Image (cartoon, rainbow, N blue to C red):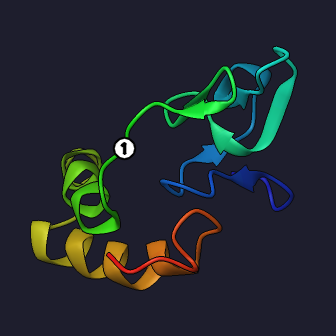
Amino acid sequence: MSQDALICQSCGMPMEKPEDFGTNLDATQNNDYCTYCYQKGAFTWKGTMEEMIEKLIPFSTQMGVSIEKARKMGKEKLPLLKRWKSKES
């Protein structure tokens, strides 16, 4: 991942290519959220932060991270992201 790559402010995924970015209602690129989390100006998934952490664990384990470490990383990183900053999980 390049140093200036943006990360999704909902799930933490690096966004490097145009197709990684979500879209606004007017079909323009959204620089805050990835295509998996945000399309046509709305979040694609309405769960809680805690549910998002659990949803992301399988992606981390595919990269060789243990379930426990993936959960710990999610609990540390997601609260810092724009979507979750002002919300309780």
In this view, the residue in front, 63 or 22, is 22
Circle 1 sits on which residue? 46
Note whether 65 is above or below 19 in the view shown: below
In this view, the residue in front, 86 or 3, is 86
- Res. 3 image quadrant: bottom right
Direction top: furthest residue: 27
Residue 85 percent coordinates (x, y): 57, 78
Question: On the rendered structure, is 60 left or right of 16?
Answer: left
The secondary element bearing badge 1 is classed as loop
Question: On the rendered structure, is 12 left or right of 46?
Answer: right
- Inspect the image, locate mark 1, and give the three-letter code of the amino acid beneath it: Lys
Give me the residue at 59% from left, 32% from top.
42
Give me the residue at 38% from left, 37% from top.
45
Crowd band around label 1 with a 10 angstrom C-alpha radius: few (<14), some (14–19), many (20+): few
The mark total stands at 1
Residue 2 percent coordinates (x, y): 78, 53
Residue 25 percent coordinates (x, y): 76, 21
In this view, the residue in front, 49 or 58, is 49
Quarter of the rendering occupied by the C terminus? bottom left
- Res. 9 image quadrant: bottom right
Give me the residue at 45% from left, 30% from top.
44
In this view, the residue in front, 73 or 1, is 73
- Res. 26 image quadrant: top right
Give me the residue at 41% from left, 85% from top.
76
Question: On the rendered structure, is 27 left or right of 81?
Answer: right
Residue 14 percent coordinates (x, y): 62, 48
